[in-house]
Image (cartoon, coloured by chain):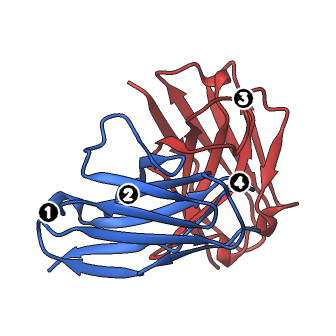
Chain colours: A blue, B red
Amino acid sequence: DIQMTQSPSSLSASVGDRVTITCQASHDINNYLNWYQQKPGKAPKLLIYDASNLETGVPSRFSGSGSGTDFTFTISSLQPEDIATYYCQQYHDLPTFGGGTKVEIK
Amino acid sequence: EVQLLESGGGLVQPGGSLRLSCTASGFTFSTYAMSWVRQAPGKGLEWVSGISGSGGTTYYVDSVKGRFTISRDNSKNTLYLQMNSLRAEDTALYYCAKDKLGSVAADGAFDIWGQGTMVTVSS
């Protein structure tokens, strides 16, 4: 199994701040990495696929980068509606998710 | 509108069975692989099982192998998850999710999700 280690597990930032979340794979997964946003009581929503591709309709302040084992997800300017938990997910092997990062407003 | 609607969850005793259903609309169901993803209360996401567009290929996470069976009826646009020998650790909100790319199972991102159906295993 490929393990996905996401950090931090939670963070608090101010509106307008740049927010960065990292995800590390236990094995090389090329660019087979996706990012999701989950708001409380809601289903997850796909934001970034194949490490760096923005899903249709997703605001451009969200971005992703990385390849191999190390990946980064960035919100360039945090907005109040971005309060959520964010998950990475690999599909190089059977899908596995990272543990999640809860983003709060300071 | 592309939509997934799960049903069939409920309270079941340990060792019992349940069958979950997921009805799809707004896209050509048979063209896309589908998966079940679960989330235990207050916990993260766990992929459970995936099935190809034709239904001919299936995959499972190790913890449910031999107990859960994924299937689909493309004539009814419906995905199923038969869950047997249920355990307390299977308690979770179960989501069905559509593969973004196409018909190969568990091979990409999940771009459409249902709202989930809750399964509680308890005596």
Cα separation between marks 3 and 2? 26 Å
SS assignment at label 4: loop
Q: Circle 1 is placed at which residue position?
A: A80
Q: Are marks 3 and 2 in contact (CB under 8 Å)?
A: no
Which residue does the image show at 78% across and 26% down from the upper left? B54
Q: Could you classify mark 2 by the number of other residues whose Cα lies within 10 Å: few (under 14), some (14-19), or many (20 or more)?
A: many
SS assignment at label 1: helix
Which residue does the image show at 40% across and 62% down from the upper left? A73
Q: Circle 4 is placed at which residue position?
A: A92
- Residue A54 horizontal/vertical position (percent): 39, 42
A94 relative to A46, above or below: below
Apparent side of residue A22 relative to residue B40 in the rendered image (left or right):
left
Discs 4 and 2 share one subunit: yes
Cα separation between marks 4 and 2? 20 Å
Amino acid bearing label 4: His
Which dot marks residue A37?
A: 2
- Residue B115 horizontal/vertical position (percent): 43, 48
Amino acid bearing label 1: Pro
In the rendered image, which quarter contains the C terminus of chain B? bottom right
Which dot marks residue B53?
A: 3
Give residue A72's quadrant in the image: bottom left
B6 relative to A1, above or below: above
